[in-house]
Structure formats: structure tokens, C-alpha cells
Amino acid sequence: NILRGGRGGHAAYREMPDSIWEHPVTSLNPTEVRRVHEQLQELRRLDFLSSATATEAFVRAGAEFSPPEADPLENLRPHFQALCDFYATAVERRLGVLMWWD
């Protein structure tokens, strides 16, 4: 395991032609991170996850997704809180953010 000085678990992944090289890293500098944080705080202030607009968006998207077993907004609230916390900490520490996905 990498924590014990070994190689990373997916070292061969970098050799796959449709992997990391097809999904470039993007970044936000500390000023941009602060802007995202401020926008998230505005959404929180508006309590947008309790709004009719958010609920309507889920209803409209419902045709594309299987029916949720529970209120989808209840599932999003802790994720939204974690996102807000992440950006608040990044702002506090004056960090930039790197984003990569596949």
C-alpha cells in the first residue's frame, strides 16, 4: 500500500489511453475558491434545497431517473453541507482547488 512506501494501487491506470490523459486537471486559484464559497453561502442563505424550484427540478428530471426511495433533497443536504464545508476550509487556509474526474 502506498502509505507504507509501496506503489499506488492503480499505477497501471496511467497507461490506459482513455484515462487520465483524456480528463485533464482543472484548477481554481484562491480568489476563485473564495468566489465559489460566497456563491455557496448565498445558496445556503436562500435555503435553495427547501425551495419549490429545487423540488420541481427533481420532478422534471424524474423521467430520466428511477423513482427515489426517499426524498432526494434529503439525500442532497449532507452533500451540499460537505461541499460548503470544503470550500469554507479552503478559503480559511487560502488554498486553491484542483479538480479531476473520469
Image: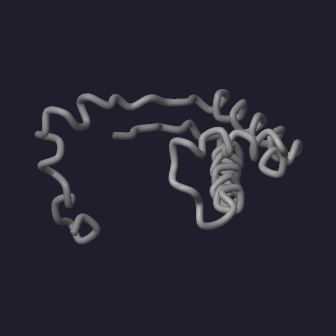
Q: Quadrant of the N terminus?
A: bottom left
> Splitting the image into 4 quarters, where does residue 69 fall?
bottom right
Of 79 and 38, the residue lying toward us? 79
Frontmost residue, 65 versus 54: 65
Q: Position of residue 65 (x, y in %)?
A: 51, 48
92 left or right of 30?
Answer: right
Q: Residue furthest right?
A: 45
Residue 46 in the image, given as x and y percentages of width and height: 88, 42
Q: How many numbered marks does the figure carry?
A: 0
The one nearer the camera, 19 or 10, is 19
Residue sitting at 44 percent across and 29 percent down?
Answer: 26
- The residue lying at 71 percent from left, 34 percent from top is 34
In the displayed structure, does residue 69 sit left or right of residue 27? right
Which residue is rendered at x = 80% and y = 39% of the image? 53
Residue 63 image position (x, y, % from top left): 56, 42
Q: Is residue 69 above or below residue 80?
A: below
Residue at 38% of width from left, 40% of height from top?
Answer: 101
Which corner quadrant holds the C terminus?
top left
**Horizontal side, residue 30 vs residue 65: left or right:** right
Residue 24's place in the image compared with 43, above or below, is above
Query: Residue 11 versus residue 95: which sits nearer the camera?
Result: 11
Q: Is residue 82 above or below residue 57?
A: below
By what rule are the colours in the image chosen? Answer: one colour
Query: x and y percent of residue 16 in the render?
Result: 13, 39
Would residue 14 appear left or right of 53 to someone viewing this image? Answer: left
- Vertical relation: 77 (above or below) 22: below
State the residue lying farthest toward the front. 63
